[in-house]
Image: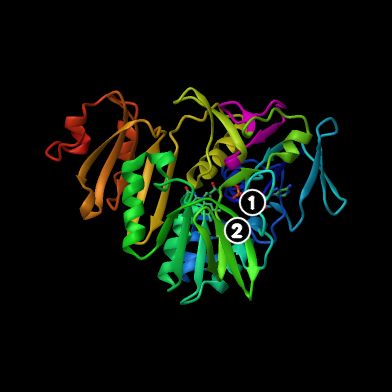
Amino acid sequence: MESIVVLGGGLAAASVVGELRELGYTGALSLVSEETQLPYERPPLSKGFLQGKEEPADFTVHDASWYASHDVALRLGVAATSIETAKRQVLLADGSALDYDQLVLATGSRASLGGRTPIPGYDLPAVHVLRTLDDAKSLRAELVEGAQVAVVGSGWIGMEVAAAARQRGARVTVYSPSEVPLAKVFGERLGNHLLELHQSHGVDVRTARVHGIEEADGHLQVLSDAGSSRADLVLLAMGAQPNVQLAEAAGLEVDSGVVVDASLRSSDARILAVGDIAQAFNTVLHRQLRVEHWDNAIRQGKLAAATLAGEERSYDWLPYFFTDQFDLGMEYVGHGSPGDTTVVRGDMESGEFFMFWQDGSEITAAANVNIWDVNGTLRGLVGREIDADRLSDPAIALKDL
Ligand SMILES: Cc1cc2nc3c(=O)[nH]c(=O)nc-3n(C[C@H](O)[C@H](O)[C@H](O)COP(=O)(O)OP(=O)(O)OC[C@H]3O[C@@H](n4cnc5c(N)ncnc54)[C@H](O)[C@@H]3O)c2cc1C
């Protein structure tokens, strides 16, 4: 009987096994995760779970009975330590081994601690990262009314945690390496909108680099370009690094992630990679792309299953992500550059608007802010050439552009 092994316990891994059984694969199927929980979705960790509005059962992908009834062998709480490609075998930390005919790598990302040399003080007790449910539980326990929270970094996770912490009554300082948070992704216009949103809710956003954290008199001191400030807890939100060590050691081609083709096969045809670690060839954008988003984990999981089932499909969709911060909910589709020009449709001050990114007149990306059920329409506009005047004209319906 054929055997497929999936390494990783995140959304991409859960999506692979779900779709394989959906497509009628009847061979042996195992999922190996170093986490002890059943695979779950991570977005609520910095949103609903931190705010106390969602609990793990709300964001667990499949419950235990699903794995049992779909004959998926779960190996939880054990890491894979190496891949023996010649023997087609995976070795696990408990000394056991699993044979495979086809292997899917879905080992995701880990929180960055600040590059090759971790930031001094990263291992102090009240210094957190946020990647796993366990991380979120310990962070949530300390996010109490009046706590002084320092967030190091102003990317998605930093800004979302800042919002959740304010909503729990904490005092929050965000240390942003750039003057405008997220400007590297969106350009200044939307970045400034997010900055003002946070400031209006009392978040102290400082442009400063943090070079260390120290403990003094039972508190933490955050040491930055802007001086030293006291904090009760610190979140290091300095980005994520793909877990590509297994792939590298197995001799697979690895660049910014595991290099895979449009059907997600790696340089070893028996090994596929999906989700955060996959640097895959996107047939719409005609380039290798690594995407660290929820939607990508689901879709690439399904694509890998289709490839394993012998279907001819490819990585042919545009990146998508969403965020929730205070009363702002946003979806974004496409792959804009910070240097693109931006066009706003609607009134930014009202909080409900669209933003388009353009390279010349070609739309490279689009976002809907607090306007819902339109992202599919925006997806259809990306790649088209439309004059900025028409894009911003509310008299022309989106579907008529
Ligand atoms: C706090 C947070 C909030 C987020 N919010 C959003 C959002 O709002 N919108 C959005 O689009 N995206 C969001 N994301 C990103 C999204 O969650 C990720 O893109 C997604 O989780 C990627 O799924 P994955 O399965 O590829 O990897 P991961 O979710 O990282 O899962 C990888 C799994 O593999 C396991 N593993 C690693 N190495 C080994 C090994 N050697 N052996 C066995 N198991 C191993 C890990 O323990 C983990 O269980 C967020 C991420 C985080 C952390």
Q: Is residue 23 visible?
A: no
Picture coordinates of residue 303 (x, y %)? 55, 36
Picture coordinates of residue 76 (x, y %)? 72, 57
The residue where tag 1 is placed is: 113
Callout 1: CB less than 8 Å from ligand 1: no
- Residue segment shown in magenta: 258-276
Amino acid at the residue labelled 1: Leu
The reply to whether callout 2 and callout 1 are in contact (CB within 8 Å) is yes
Picture coordinates of residue 154 (x, y %)? 47, 51
In the rendered structure, the answer to whether residue 384 lies left or right of residue 211 reads: left
Magenta region includes residue 290: no
Above or below 285: residue 16: below
Amino acid at the residue labelled 2: Val
Q: Nearer the viewer, residue 67 or 88?
A: 88
Q: Nearer the viewer, residue 199 or 50?
A: 199
The residue where tag 2 is placed is: 129
